[in-house]
Amino acid sequence: MDLLEHQGKSYFARFAIPVSTGGVAATVEEALDVADGAGYPVVVKAQVHVGGRGKAGGVRVVADRAEAEAAATAILGMSIKGHVVHTVLVEHATDIAEEYYASFTLDRAAKLHLGMLSAEGGVDIEQVAVDTPGAIARLPIDPVDGLSEALCRVWVAGAGLREEAVAGTVELLLALYRCFVEGDADLAEVNPLVLTTDGRVLALDAKVTLDDNAAFRHPEWKEYEGTQELDERERLAREKGLQYIGLDGSVGIIANGAGLAMSTLDVVNQAGGRPANFLDIGGGASAAVMANALEVINTDENVRAIFVNVFGGITRGEEVAKGIVEAMGRVELTSPLVVRLDGTNAAEGRAILARHESDRLQSRATMLDAARAAVELAGGGKG
Amino acid sequence: MAIFVDETTKVVVQGLTGSQGRFYGLRNRDYGTQVVAGTNPRKAGTDIEGIPVFATVGEAAAATGATASCIFIPAPGVFGAVLEAAEGGMELIVVITEGVPAQDEARLYNLLCRDFPGTRLLGPNCPGIITPDRCNIGITAGEIALGGGPVGIVSRSGTLTYQALYELQQAGIGVTTCVGIGGDPVPGTSFIDCLAAFEADSETSAVMLIGEIGGSAEEEAAEYIKAMMTKPVVAYVAGLTAPPGRRMGHAGAIVSGSKGTARAKIDALRAAGAQVAANPTEAGFLMAAVVAGL
């Protein structure tokens, strides 16, 4: 789960990571209340799940109340790369002396935690990584040992920060590491981490990605739910407990298992079609699950054909076939179905499908044949 | 031979008394696997259809000689269950459970490396391991696996593991061992661990590798194939046309660079000398040709 900046900062606050004075607002009036409390000048920042908000005019520094009103009025409701701004973060504008970059993430290749710290923050840090990789001090951390204060001091000393920033940065990084580990984040990133003209070290931005698998031990994450941006199809799928990602093609996809679902997208593309979605119904393929999946895909107006690609493992072919037939009875489908059923008892399953074969339900023996048939029904390569 | 497990492997199922553990534990036994024990501290002394239940893995191992464990315990309990199995002397710990927090996986992996170097962890979030006709630990349907070699399979994806087994079965090609390493961020066993074991296994003559987008495990496998493998490798990487995944801030981009896309993985595997198929069926055909030429 990706947190918005203001959520990330409230999460930071739980770990005593210093941030600017301010708060979130959903209306112009609220924004002005927060601005009055934070003290002018303030910065008004659009809260959206997408980068590049600065360039899009979603971040404004203003000197007084009148300007703050104009900024909040302009930013609330604006669209940034298709994301409508529902809230703004209003903070006291800090006088910045230096801008740094800091993050903790998991280095999957090394199977270790990785801290990154750079004196060249604020700017495009990814470009820094390419052009001058030496400008980023990388610290591999053994997850069993964790980040000790001594190790953190050595790391910060090697990053080339200004002397007066060192003590505050060490303290902030130790807190940020706790946020990363105890907070079960996949990513805890601060860009920029700033040294203010009056000598304080603050997190001026917050990018936090929480590990959804750890939600069971974080009841406090409840408050972040419901702010994730999903399209209608994705919202419906999530309610039904399905792994769904909306795409813009015309061939609806239902598969069991993420790998097989990805593979299904691949073969539809290879057959000259365009998938309308990614949908993983998980290991089993009961009638109830299948009906839910068909219902979600049915709401997609672009879909012209549906490709059901199921591999029977423990769930036997005949059970899968019965599930499909039963689900078709429950859902009024707007598009024809092409089913490829393989695996345990596939022959028995296909025999059941054959008895129900019609222009609404076809069965094919292989993934490639089924993909070709579905693409053809969807209008060929034009889809 | 085969790798990691065979007919002599004795298995304790952690969570045997739960619905999943019971269902798959008994299936594994029906397949012929030596499922000799289960654990549940509150049900020690009872049994599940003749399989004795002990309080801990250590007690189960002492009484039965089990050397492998299979974990069906819900995600919050996995960290403790793996440590219990390692302390109980298990040489192989297979974690089927999905949804284990990444921080737990990272700590577990490094903890086992340091304190239990003789213990192999497989998973979490994996289908398990099967040496057809001899041992099946986990949730793979034994019916779709043809035994006898000469192909070893290693896969990151559950259903594509089954697909690979099935494609080979349809082509009449046997499998030595099929290892599902799971697709989580920190798998206990890597592609490289399995490639090395297959390279050393006298019964295995060729390897099928099934990868997917994300991470850099396939790229690392490619480096290993290039440097160390004499046996032919046929690969398939799912997700060439998958929607772009979540981007993990700047840090993710800095760490992974251009790695992680299916294209990068396919290019790396081809450059390493592996044959890369466009889909699972083609992987089966390519492997059939490889086996015919052995």
Image (tube, coloured by chain):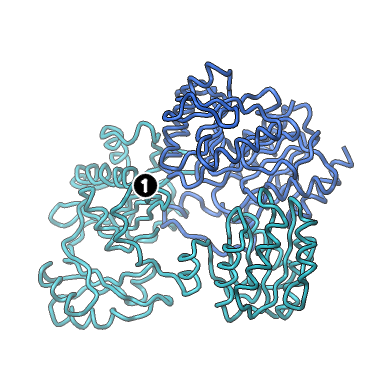
Chain colours: A cyan, B blue
- Residue at the farthest right position: B292
Is disc 1 surrounded by few (<14), some (14 to 19) or many (20+) residues within 10 Å? many
Q: Position of residue A298 (x, y in %)?
A: 58, 76
Q: Position of residue A360 (x, y in %)?
A: 72, 77
Residue at the (69%, 29%) spot, across then down: B3
Badge 1 element: strand
For label 1, the residue is A104
* Placement of the C terminus of chain A among the 4 image quadrants: bottom right
Tell me: A228 left or right of A109.
left
Q: Position of residue A50 (x, y in %)?
A: 40, 68
* Placement of the N terminus of chain A among the 4 image quadrants: bottom left
Residue at the (26%, 72%) spot, across then down: A88
Residue type at tag 1: Phe
Instruction: Give B67 or A192, whichever is nearer the viewer.
Output: B67
Q: Position of residue A14 (x, y in %)?
A: 22, 51
Name which quarter of the figure residue A96 lies in: bottom left
Name which quarter of the figure residue A270 lies in: bottom right
Instruction: Give A234 or B198, whichever is nearer the viewer.
Output: A234
Q: Chain of mark 1?
A: A
Tell me: A363 left or right of A288.
right
Reply above or below: A258 against A295: above
Residue at the (50%, 41%) spot, across then down: B186
Reply above or below: A178 against B264: above
- Residue at the farthest top position: B62
**Total residue callouts:** 1
Tell me: B78 left or right of A382.
left
Name which quarter of the figure residue A268 lies in: bottom right
